[in-house]
Image (tube, rainbow, N blue to C red):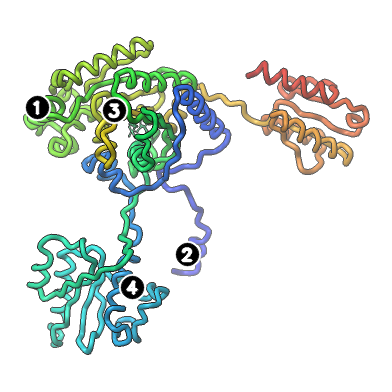
């Protein structure tokens, strides 16, 4: 790199990663208001807050959300933690078992002092070919937590490369821990003259596959099991707020780090009143934050049985096969992987075809049909308006029976501000007891966007009071005034240096202050302070207690 390029590189400005963003004031005040409203509304329905880790085992999400869903198959941020540590542990144990003094690692020069873990960085990737001489025999070895047939083939290739150089075939060695070796591997290795050595290690820590959470329902269920919440009075009602991560194509209302406010109700019965109350709470929340034009869509996707959803999916699949060549590539693929998801398609050309597909409502079992009818009745009892949408199947595998979604105006194509549904089998699927469950998650970014678009997001911006002070004596009074006003809950700007009054008032204006409190020598000696209302320029002189009272009254009127 030339010096000039290096300098340019150094000066390069950092930017937030695509699909992530900073949330700045004053907008963050709206975020806080929305979150505060969720705390208030949800607690009136008996929900308690749960705070969850941002990352979990990848397997937790894969098993709950489903391997064939977009969220798991394409959008997860996952990584492996501890690969090198595990491989190194295998290498160290192996070399300690063989006399460490005689083991020569040619590639790294000098005798191997494997008992010093600090040296592990010098060893390079142990999962790749390591060349060494063992008791005078040339050896190519791999030290690996999870071995695959590929390792055998690659060792064999490396050995053959020796032969091509006219050297003798080296000893080929694959070292791993017991319990991770795939079926058929032992005989495959034997045929290829690769020695497969299994080393037992006390307290071995296998590597972990971890992921940033793409959603939180799976985590809540994991926590329910982990903390034995089935022993608490049921149902357990929990809610959460926080960031989620999905590697989606960013666009308006769709981010890679986005925020959800969600609630889950676990345990107890699957009484339709529970479904209806969860939805009622949601609509109460939306009403309270001032979301306008929200539409609630509901559906029932039955349960996973031959006489219910599975039967329907089979019918849907055969209907889709018949129109396969009229569908786009995504839907064509989904016929095999997840036919229900075809109903989610927004592709214009597929709409008339989808409209003619069989409806799930006609294939629900009697129990699911009854449950769905009762949910609708319960919603009506609560005065919750809804629209039925037979195509609402949702993109995550864990749902059964009730599913719902809420759309809001001003969001373009990403108009779902909330999605949810029932997931009775999920806790059991994750190793817990049979447990009923239902919940939802609100997309907070989209909710905020919709509030902003509808003009419902007007926030009291700026300071309540800007203190324009001049002179040392006035400064002491200004500090005290700022302290008292802040204690009374007003936002106050106290400039750190003296300014001419004209300049101070200009500054107060720029900051959007409502009032300027003018403190000069006169005000201090008369104990009468000047308060200027910046909107109309009027001024009044007030004693300190009167000033506080006046500001309090004004605040009450405007809120
Ligand atoms: P979901 O439908 O995947 O459901 O997400 C819920 C909401 O999160 C969506 O309706 C949307 O508002 C918002 N959202 C999703 N992806 C993005 C994104 N990339 N950018 C911005 N907002 C997004 C769930 O996550 C389930 N866990 C909901 C649930 C809880 N079901 C039962 N309990």
Q: Quadrant of ligand 1?
A: top left
Disc 1 target residue: 315
Cα–Cα span, label 3 and label 4: 49 Å
Secondary structure of residue under mark 1: helix
Residue 360 lies in quadrant? top left
413 and 58: which one is in front? 58
Q: Which mark, by number, is residue 124?
A: 4
* Closer mark to the observer between disc 1 and disc 2: 1
Identify the residue at horizontal 79%, vertical 43% (top origin): 497
Residue 110 lies in quadrant? bottom left
Disc 2 target residue: 5
20 and 51: which one is in front? 51
Where residue 543 sits in the image (x, y, percent)?
85, 23
Cα–Cα span, label 2 and label 3: 56 Å
Cα–Cα span, label 4 and label 1: 55 Å
Q: Earlier in the sequence, mark 1 or mark 2?
A: 2
* Closer mark to the observer between disc 3 and disc 4: 3
Identify the residue at horizontal 50%, vertical 66% (top origin): 4
Q: Which mark, by number, is residue 422?
A: 3
Q: Earlier in the sequence, mark 1 or mark 3?
A: 1
The CB of the residue at mark 3 lies under 8 Å from ligand 1? yes
Where residue 382 sits in the image (x, y, percent)?
38, 12
Secondary structure of residue under mark 4: loop
Question: Does residue 226 sit above or below 382 in this rendering?
Answer: below
Where residue 344 sits in the image (x, y, percent)?
23, 29
The C terminus: image quadrant: top right
Q: Kindly check if marks 2 and 3 are in contact, taking CB atoms under 8 A apart as contact.
A: no
Q: Badge 3: few (under 14), some or many (20 or more) residues near its Cα, within 10 Å?
A: many
Identify the residue at horizontal 29%, vertical 11% (top origin): 377
Q: Badge 4: few (under 14), some or many (20 or more) residues near its Cα, within 10 Å?
A: some
Q: Earlier in the sequence, mark 2 or mark 3?
A: 2
Where residue 510 sits in the image (x, y, percent)?
68, 33
């Amino acid at each position: 790199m030339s010096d000039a390029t290096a300098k340019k590189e150094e000066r390069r400005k950092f930017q937030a990663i695509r699909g992530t963003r900073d949330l700045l004031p004053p907008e963050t005040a709206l975020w806080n208001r929305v979150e505060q409203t969720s705390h208030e509304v949800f607690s009136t329905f008996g929900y308690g807050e749960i705070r969850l880790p941002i990352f979990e085992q990848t397997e937790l999400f894969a098993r709950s959300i489903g391997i064939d869903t977009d969220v798991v198959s394409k959008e997860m941020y996952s990584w492996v933690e501890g690969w090198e540590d595990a491989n190194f542990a295998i290498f160290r144990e192996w070399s300690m078992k063989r006399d460490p003094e005689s083991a020569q690692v040619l590639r790294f020069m000098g005798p191997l002092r494997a008992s010093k873990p600090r040296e592990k960085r010098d060893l390079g990737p142990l999962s790749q070919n390591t060349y060494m001489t063992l008791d005078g025999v040339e050896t190519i070895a791999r030290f690996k937590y999870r071995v695959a047939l590929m390792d055998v083939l690659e060792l064999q290739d490396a050995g053959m490369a020796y032969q091509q150089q006219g050297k003798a075939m080296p000893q080929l060695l694959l070292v791993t821990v017991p319990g991770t070796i795939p079926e058929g591997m032992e005989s495959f290795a034997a045929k290829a003259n690769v020695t497969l050595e299994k080393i037992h290690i006390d307290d071995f820590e296998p590597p972990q596959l971890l992921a940033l959470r793409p959603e939180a329902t799976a985590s809540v269920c994991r926590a329910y099991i982990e903390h034995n919440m089935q022993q608490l009075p049921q149902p357990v009602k929990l809610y959460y707020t926080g960031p989620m991560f999905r590697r989606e194509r960013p666009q308006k209302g769709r981010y890679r780090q986005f925020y959800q406010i969600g609630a889950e109700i676990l345990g107890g019965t699957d009484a339709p009143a529970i479904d209806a109350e969860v939805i009622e709470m949601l609509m109460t929340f939306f009403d309270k934050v001032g979301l306008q034009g929200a539409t609630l869509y509901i559906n029932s996707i039955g349960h996973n049985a031959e006489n219910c959803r599975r039967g329907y999916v089979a019918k849907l699949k055969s209907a889709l096969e018949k129109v396969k060549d009229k569908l786009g590539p995504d839907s064509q693929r989904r016929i095999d992987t997840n036919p229900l998801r075809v109903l989610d398609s927004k592709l214009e050309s597929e709409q008339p075809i989808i409209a003619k597909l069989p409806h799930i409502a006609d294939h629900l079992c009697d129990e699911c049909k009854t449950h769905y009818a009762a949910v609708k009745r319960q919603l009506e009892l609560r005065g919750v308006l809804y629209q039925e949408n037979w195509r609402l199947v949702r993109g995550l595998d864990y749902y059964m029976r009730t599913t719902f979604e809420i759309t809001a105006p001003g969001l373009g194509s990403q108009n779902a501000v909330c999605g949810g549904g029932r997931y009775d089998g999920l806790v059991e699927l994750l190793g817990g007891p049979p447990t009923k469950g239902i919940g939802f998650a609100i997309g907070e970014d989209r909710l905020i966007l919709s509030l902003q678009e509808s003009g419902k997001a007007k926030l009291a911006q700026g300071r309540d009071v800007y203190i324009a002070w001049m002179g040392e004596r006035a400064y002491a009074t200004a500090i005290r005034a700022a302290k008292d006003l802040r204690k009374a809950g007003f936002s106050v700007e106290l400039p750190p240096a003296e300014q001419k009054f004209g300049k101070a008032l200009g500054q107060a204006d720029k900051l959007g202050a409502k009032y300027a409190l003018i403190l000069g020598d006169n005000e201090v000696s008369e104990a009468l302070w000047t308060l200027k209302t910046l909107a109309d320029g009027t001024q009044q002189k007030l004693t300190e207690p009167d000033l506080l009272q006046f500001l309090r009254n004004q605040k009450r009127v405007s809120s």
